[in-house]
Amino acid sequence: MNIQQYAVRLPVALAIATLFTACGGGGGDPTRVPGRVDTPSTPTPTPTPNDTRPDGCKAYIAADKTVAADKAGGASVLSCGAPLADVSWSQVSGPAVTLQAARTPTITFEPREKGVIVLRADVTLADGSRQSLSTDVTVTEAPVGSFLTLRADHSVRPGTETSVRAWPNLFGGDKVVGIVWTQVSGPAVTMNTEDPQLLMFKAPDVTADVALRFRATMTLNSGVKDSDDVLISLDRQAAPGQGALFDITARVHPYRQAGAYAAVLARCAYDVGVRYSGSSNTLCSAEVLPPLQTEAGIGAVPSVAQVMGRVLVSHDFLGANFEQFLLTQDANSDFRRLLASVSSIVIGSHVRPSFYSAGTGAIYLDANNLWLTAEQRDVVTEVPDYRAAFDDNLNFIPLGRSVKNNAYARRSYPSTTRVTRTTDELLFDLGRLMYHELAHANDFLPSVERAMNPQRSIWENIVDRVGNRTLPSDALAVQFPLQSSEMLGMGQVLYQGKTATSVQKGYTATDIGRFFGSDRASDDYAYSIFEDDSSREDLAMLFEEFMMSYRHDVRYDVGYINQTTGSDLIVGWGQRGRIAEPAIKPRVKLVLQRIAPWIDASAVDRLPAPLMMRAGESWDANLVLNPPGGFSRQSALRKESADERAARLRGDIRQRERHGKMTPDARQP
């Protein structure tokens, strides 16, 4: 299943500002290289002798031989034969460093003092045998003056798109005038460096594990240069068979190694060996990996411990952050009740976009919603979760944001800034995402359903209801169908990749607002409908928006602007809190009764009344909306840099996962 995401480009003025700040804010011509070239302020890391695969080996390590303090170093363990079954890194001695990716083939670390770091990799080979290897990395003096650091060394599966960011550390008025990337070793890749601070590429197919090295060289306005290298290893896996649900899966492991289902989580939920082809399939039975509700018991709410026993992660901090989120942000037990319908939770640095699969009964979460520190964010890919831009021939741009008390509910996080966030702040990213994906899960398999044949897979327990169109989303489509033919058509263009007609290309923001406003969807993503299915996104958006308003006092803005080359986004039509429209309330009540019956449906009648935006004013000016008699309008926006504004507006431009068919008769993303 190809899942794409609708994406639109920033207006030209904002795009230029984004590119400018991405170049380090130096203000110079990034193509101009001054005539004077000084010796780099720190030595370029050099490969260790064992970058070359030794004869007769089972596994070997490729690592930086030296690294300057305050820069990033890396080390990879590579198989000499079949794919590695398991990896675990540890530090033996030397200045203490943090290994964010200790369960992956490649680790990254940033030493703060001189010394010799000894690292150890304990690997399990494909045949079950084990081997321990070690490597030494010499840490030299920290750079004097401005320097460049690449973050972060990591491993990926062949065929995966990935990224590395260059971080200029500038002192004494230095400015960046250029950053140039080169590939130092490994099979050649096509490098995307449209943003000079960001390298993106697709990992090539290989017949053996191999390490790729890339170098970025920064030139300052003084003419001084500095370089840094990064190590990306290609971590092979078995080829997917016919009918495989996944073409590629990232390396993940059970967060709770001693959990009751730890041994089956990966092979049942996230492996290229998971296949479905009619009667020939490898889907695990509900006896092998049942929904959480079965483990918790009929009518019981799964405990946090039971949930965490179903979690697969690429990095352990993702599991720790997810657990803390459940412990602190689920006061009403909504998330745990909803999680009762899933078999497992997969969280990965290269899982993008997030999605639900009825084939495995699992939800798959993008790690970008779970980082708390800059170091954790470093290991999360920046490759966008869309594969095509469908807006180029349209006259309008859809916008959306979450608002609380006339201010943004969530912060924006510019990719060029080292930032942290709290577990409380995860609510506006992870919480929203969880409500959405778990709405899908409870649409296909409501946790309140009691009948489950343990001898059949979760999908085989669901398939009859799908075929008979008796899911909650089917009931929604029958009792309260979407009616705007114009929006149903635009949904295919915006979210399903259809080519716009000449009539659709002529629609203005005002036209789209009129079509949308007269129908009964809370969000235009409701019109993302796969072939002849009912709209699964209609149900998910209704539930997501209701829960964010009901539980967290967060209201959603939806708006449309015309395509513009200016820096201001002028609203053609917009509304806040549309979930409380009289025509939409009965639809929300149906959803609650079918997938969240513990919530009193009368709460829908107490939602704040919707507010219309002021057409003709800017998107920013419409952040403060007051009911009649309210206080005077004032800006709720704090001062922000061009980079911060670009990041905020990039988040407002509607970016939704393009879920295709969520059932196992089509590939997963």
Image: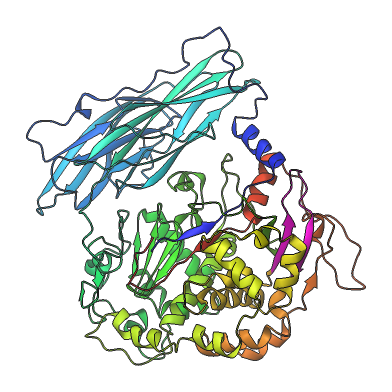
Q: Which of 559 and 332 lies nearest the eye of the viewer?
A: 559
Residue 218: image location, x then y, percent: 51, 22
Residue at the farthest front position: 502
Q: How is the image coloured?
A: rainbow
- In the rendered image, the vertical position of residue 459 relative to residue 311, given as above or below: below
Q: Quadrant of residue 282?
A: bottom left
Left or right: 530 as drawn, with respect to 98: right
Q: Position of residue 467 (x, y in %)?
A: 38, 85
Residue 568 within the magenta-colored segment of the rendering? yes
Position of 109 relative to 441 (above/below): above
Which residue is the extreme one toward the top? Answer: 36
Return the x and y of residue 50 as percentages of the image width and height: 20, 28
Report the front residue among 404 and 116.
404
Which residue corresponds to the image point at 52% horizontal and 72% vertical from the top-left?
Answer: 529
What residue range appears in magenta?
A: 556-577
Question: Where 76 sits versus 351, above or below?
Answer: above
Above or below, 633 against 102 in this view is: below
Residue 406 appearing in the image: no
Quadrant position of residue 483: bottom right
Counting the numbered discs, the total is 0
Specify whether residue 49 is painted magenta.
Answer: no
The N terminus appears in which quarter of the rendering?
A: bottom left
In the rendered image, the quadrant that contains the C terminus is bottom left
Is any part of residue 5 visible from this angle?
yes
Q: Position of residue 407 (x, y in %)?
A: 75, 60
The image quarter in which residue 547 lies: bottom right
Asked if residue 414 lies left or right of residue 42, the reply is: right
> Is residue 199 left or right of 211 when viewed as pictured?
right
Depth check: give the residue in front, 88 or 459.
459
Relative depth, front residue between 323 and 287: 287
Q: Residue drawn at (75%, 65%), measured in percent from left and top?
A: 511
The residue sitting at the left extreme is 56
